[in-house]
Image (cartoon, rainbow, N blue to C red):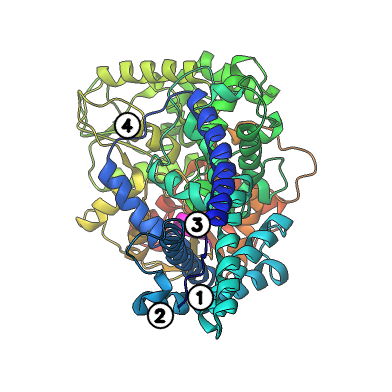
Amino acid sequence: MPDPVASPIWLWLATALAGGLFLHRVSRYLMVLGQARAEVRWDRPWQRLLGVINQVFLQRRFLNEPFIGVVHLIIFWSFVCFALTFWWALLRGLLPVLPIPYPDDVRAVSTLMKLFSALGLSALFLAAARRYFFPPERLERTWDATLILSLIGVVLVSYLAMAAARSASSYRLWWWIHMLTVLGFLAYLPYSKHLHLLAAPFGVFFTSRDNRKLPPPGEGAELRNEFTWRQLFNGLACAECGRCDRNCPACSSGFALSPKDLMHEVKLLVRSGKGDSPLPIKPEAVWACTTCGACMERCFCFNEHLPLIIDVRRKLVARGEVEPRLQEALTRLNRYGNSFGVAPRARPKWTQGLEFPVKDARKEPVEYLWFTGDYAALDPRVQPATRALARLLHAAHVDFGILYDAEQNAGNDVRRVGEEGLFETLVEKNHAALAKAHFLHLFTTDPHSYHALKNEYDWTDRRLVPLHSVELLEQLMRAGKLPVRNPLRRKVTYHDPCYLGRYNGLYDAPRKVLDAIGIDLVEMGRNRQEAFCCGAGGGRIWMEDAPGIEQRPAENRVLEAAGLKGVAVLVTACPKDLVMFHDAVKTAGLEGRMEVRDIAELVEQAVAPSKEHAHA
């Protein structure tokens, strides 16, 4: 091929202009990030690199959506191929004295680029058709996206035209169109929402790798320089694809929160304003979050919405800007150690309906200490399931006890509404009570308590690994201590609680239990890590719903369950789910058609000597 660069001066000027615009904007971003709160994200470098390989180069999370995942993977690798050959061609054009050929003069490289040009154009056409003719909810058709797709298209078409050119002048024309388009793309990229093409790989590398991680305790954040650099970086890495919104229970129900819009506001905060500029997010949007983690689970850029929201909540709590019902719940928790506002001596009253005594672990040693949690112990709608579990443990000859009036709320939701001081108080009181008890193992019924006990309490002295009750049931059934005498030959569906599933990966144990008792499990479309939240988490169960809500998350979920053929029972393993779903069955008009049960209640039916002795 002829040398397309007769004199490199124009190429130098174009490169300097594009590079100057690119560096000007990027240096601005780096300056803003440098002024933010420090946050260490350099640990476990090899694990982080492995994450980049899996999620950037192999795009594992993207491939969970097969069609667009494959399309995006092809476009990505076309982008990588042309980025590499562009820099090669640019270097050769800028420094003609170098004894190297242009990339398209190398047969193997030229063949590869033609292949990726053809594949990339096909994938680009499919992506454009999806965006403009069959767009999923919250995927917007903006001029910015149109321009980026057009630039990528020109890059691919110009290379094919260059490869097909039959004259030196035609080849030179298309070569310059190709190179100038890429330089223009480079200059525009930092000013575009497609900055995620450059920022997302770093977002993956610097992710916490753990959606359970919260910001270090502090007074929260509102102004730009009060956020950590990683929280601000979320906005730069966001692709604004809308997946977080489509999976957010608050956004889907019509609450004020849009995780995508939140990331967009963060991006604008980084781009403009001063260090004392506030993040423009309304309090009602902040309080709408259920902290279910679905936004982070579905984000292909690995943005971290929850730590940012919780830091904003901390600031609101510090200023006393808390809605009345939530403030009442926090006051009750501070005064009584539970969100119901009842005297501590009322906590063990659920045991009065049992035919055997439950040990006080402070007074006599037990093998298993049961940390019941507020709703399992105090809510009348949940107490039947609590007693069912107690009877199962008794039948399996499990030596268990409780803390009676010494137990306090575990503090999981207290911490996620931003009340770090109260959380620390509850932790101290629970540790003091646990120190007086004599036990070998600790378990709880409540996934929220389970998460806090397992991941946010310090067990270095005892070396404890807390269990959820469904794990204990699975162990007992596997050991033959709960033989199934009355298999339940019926279809049910199971709801994965957020703090059991997404937060702690506990998906198999409940399904093994259901299988062991003869259940025909029919999965909802959204199950396991994609399960839809009931709407109770993050303190939402203590708050009023905003007016004008289209459909509460719990109603959405029970309607999904009711849509399954032959299914009339929705099973869960979370006391808060029971409360939310019981109410939702009524408000959704499903009474008589859909029954909500705790998994322990079904197990008790299956292990009872006969149907006549099974507890309802």
Q: Which residues are magenta?
A: 526-530
Name the residue tied to disc 1. 117
The Cα–Cα distance between marks 4 and 1, rounded to whole angstroms, is 71 Å
Residue at 55 percent of width and 70 percent of height: 175
| Labels 3, 4: front one | 3
- Residue depicted at 59% across the width and 75% down the height: 157
User: Considering only order in the chain, which callout, 2 or 3, is on the residue closer to the N terminus?
Assistant: 2
- Distance Cα–Cα, label 1 vs label 2: 10 Å
State the CA–CA distance, disc 4 to disc 2. 75 Å
Depicted 247 relative to depicted 452: above or below: below
Residue 565 in view (yes/no):
no
Residue type marked 4? Val
Label 2 element class: helix
Label 1 or label 2, whichever comes before in sequence order: 2
Q: Mark 4 or mark 3, which is nearer the start of the sequence?
A: 4
Mark 3 closeness class: few <14, some 14–19, many ≥20 residues within 10 Å = some
Check disc 2 and report the residue beneath it.
111
Mark 3 and mark 2: Cα distance apart in space: 41 Å
Q: Amino acid at mark 1?
A: Ser
Magenta run includes residue 327: no
